[in-house]
């Protein structure tokens, strides 16, 4: 089966199972994104206990 046939069959299976809107929502979730999450996360400092407490308090207000 060629790539185009596989893609077409896959789209049709998604439409059959989820409907057109459900298929579109599902495909939107498959965004690959960009960047290196692990490297970027290591560069963000962890909040101090005080910063975390302030954040929690702000969320509950």
Image (cartoon, rainbow, N blue to C red):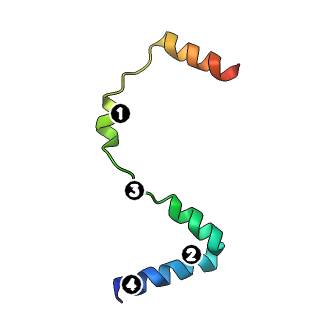
- Of mark 1 and mark 4, the one earlier in the sequence is 4
Q: Are marks 1 and 3 in contact (CB under 8 Å)?
A: no
What is the spatial separation of the Cα atoms under label 1 and label 4, in whole angstroms?
Answer: 37 Å
Residue beneath disc 1 = 41
In depth, the one of 61 and 17 nearer the eye is 61
Q: Secondary structure at mark 3?
A: loop
Which of the labelled discs sits on residue 12, or is there none? none
Q: Is residue 15 above or below residue 41?
A: below
Residue beneath disc 3 = 32
Horizontal arrangement in the rendering, residue 29 relative to residue 44 (left or right): right
The mark closer to the camera, 2 or 3, is 3
What is the spatial separation of the Cα atoms under label 2 and label 3, in whole angstroms?
Answer: 19 Å
Quarter of the view holding residue 54: top right
- Of mark 4 and mark 2, the one earlier in the sequence is 4
Which of the labelled discs sits on residue 14, or is there none? 2
Instruction: Give the residue at the far top of this rendering.
Output: 50
- Of mark 3 and mark 4, the one earlier in the sequence is 4
Q: Are marks 2 and 3 in contact (CB under 8 Å)?
A: no
Residue beneath disc 4 = 4
Quarter of the view holding residue 38: top left
Q: Secondary structure at mark 2?
A: helix
- Of mark 1 and mark 3, the one earlier in the sequence is 3
Relative image position of residue 59 (x, y in whole percent): 64, 23
Local packing at callout 3 (Cα closer than 10 Å; few below 14, some 14-19, many 20+) is: few
Instruction: Give the residue at the far bottom of this rendering.
Output: 1
């Amino acid at each position: 089966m060629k790539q185009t046939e596989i893609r077409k069959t896959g789209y049709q299976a998604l439409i059959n199972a989820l409907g057109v809107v459900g298929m579109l929502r599902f495909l939107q979730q498959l965004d690959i994104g960009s960047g290196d999450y692990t490297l970027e996360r290591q560069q963000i400092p962890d909040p101090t206990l005080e910063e975390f407490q302030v954040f929690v308090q702000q969320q509950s207000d």
